Image (cartoon, rainbow, N blue to C red):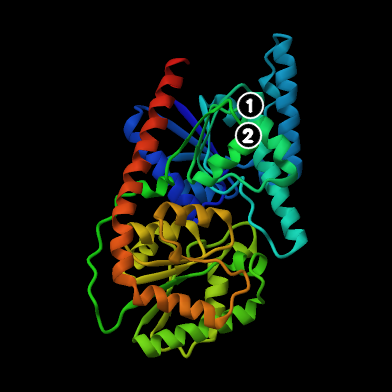
Amino acid sequence: MKVHIIGNINPLNNGWRILLISVTSFLSKKIPNIEFTKESIFPQIDEKINPMCKCTMTMKSSITLLISTFVRALLWRFFKLLKLEVTAIFNESLRQYYEADVIIDLSGDGLCPPQSKSRWYSFAKILFKLANLTSILIAIILDKKVVLYSISIGNLGILTPLAKIVLDNVKIIVVRDYESLEYLRKIKVTKPIMYFAPDAAFSMQLNKKTFEDKDEPIIGFNLSTEAIWHFHNIKFEHFAKITGSIIDYLSKNLGAKIVLIPFSLGGPFKHDDDRIILSEVLKYTTGNNVSLLKGDDLSSIISAISKCDMLVTMRMHPAIVSLLYGIPTLIISHSPKFHGLVRLIGFNDLLYTSLQIDYESLKNKILHLWENRHVIRTSIEDKVNFLASSSIDGLERMASMLCEISKQH
């Protein structure tokens, strides 16, 4: 069986990478002789760090390539109606689609745009979502079975009419939060098989963490350059100063060791690199008991999170990794997907929702979680175990349906 993965285009974003690994490793165990291909913005890097996939340049790497691929798909469909086979017109992106038995979209929040503080970036996000919908539509034009897995869907605005048409013609939609399921019902998407399953990252088998109260607790900070530049109503340097001051406070008053943990390490845009904001924050600390994690190995990043007694994050998958270890996790929200995650955990204190970040409110929120860390650990443990089990069940269900599709070929 050949599976082509779309939407998951940046291998330097470890959130996308965890999603990719979780799904492909599970399906490899369940479906004999399964083969994966994948679109990527950096195909050579992608193949090196994700050797289970043969990668090709994504059609979304340029508007010209996307439009050209869409037109070629339409031409193929037209000639097919005339009973003519014209695969010679395919480019490499379209050939990967055509040769696959199933197309799986692993874009995560690829159809759930956050609210940006700038109009031009909001417009850019709309274009990106349009590109995602177009890439799914191309698969539909080629008569391919399409699966959307571990996806958040919402807030599509002017793209809603197109999204309804496209989503009503895919085979399976598996959402990772109940809000997405409600949104699909709201826009009257009814034809696909649709169900909820927690994010595939919850299926990761991570060793349970043993907590000890110690004189030098470790508090991790994972911050997003993109979120500060484009989503929160705060200037970049001012946020760095605020966070640096909070870090110094935690170091002095709690005796904490602070680890700055980057999770997204680059991409097609400068804002894709978490190290930019983390390095800026580091400038505004005294430097005592504060370090920036070096290296780009995913296992080292997960290991660094596992050593934390608390994590402050602006990203989805570091939060999931932290919660799997039972670590109290404060999520600084800029997107509906975080609300969906916290709703699953059932503990609203894990969410910081103010887009106008200020020193006192953020510091007090961190201290509140720290002072109640024992209660939080107990509260989230059973819930996280249930979500991990449910995530595996969701993958099992998808694997079974893929096996049925395979039998039809």
Identify which amino acid the numbered label 2 is placed on.
Answer: Ile
Residue carrying label 1: 140
For image coordinates 67% across by 37% down, the residue present is 163
Residue carrying label 2: 136
Label drawn at residue 297: none
Q: Secondary structure at mark 1?
A: helix
Pick out the residue farthest to the top. Answer: 83
- Residue 53's place in the image compared with 116, above or below, is above
Is 373 positioned to the left or the right of 266 in the image?
Answer: left
Q: Secondary structure at mark 2?
A: helix
Q: Nearer the viewer, residue 17 or 196?
A: 196
For image coordinates 74% across by 64% down, the residue present is 118
- Residue 308's place in the image compared with 67, above or below, is below
Q: Position of residue 241 (x, y in %)?
A: 57, 84
Q: In terms of image quadrants, where is residue 82? A: top right
- Residue 168's place in the image compared with 258, above or below, is above
Q: In terms of image quadrants, where is residue 121? A: bottom right
Identify which amino acid the numbered label 1 is placed on.
Answer: Ile
Numbered marks: total: 2
How far apart marks 1 and 2 lie (CA) works out to 7 Å
Is 16 positioned to the left or the right of 87 in the image?
Answer: left
For image coordinates 75% across by 37% down, the residue present is 67
Q: Is residue 120 visible?
A: yes
Q: Are marks 1 and 2 in contact (CB under 8 Å)?
A: yes
For image coordinates 39% across by 90% down, the residue present is 252
Badge 2: few (under 14), some or many (20 or more) residues near its Cα, within 10 Å?
many
Q: Position of residue 3 (x, y in %)?
A: 48, 31
Q: In terms of image quadrants, where is residue 248? A: bottom left
- Residue 188's place in the image compared with 240, above or below, is above
Is 81 positioned to the left or the right of 329 in the image?
Answer: right
Badge 1: few (under 14), some or many (20 or more) residues near its Cα, within 10 Å?
some
Q: Position of residue 365 (x, y in %)?
A: 46, 75
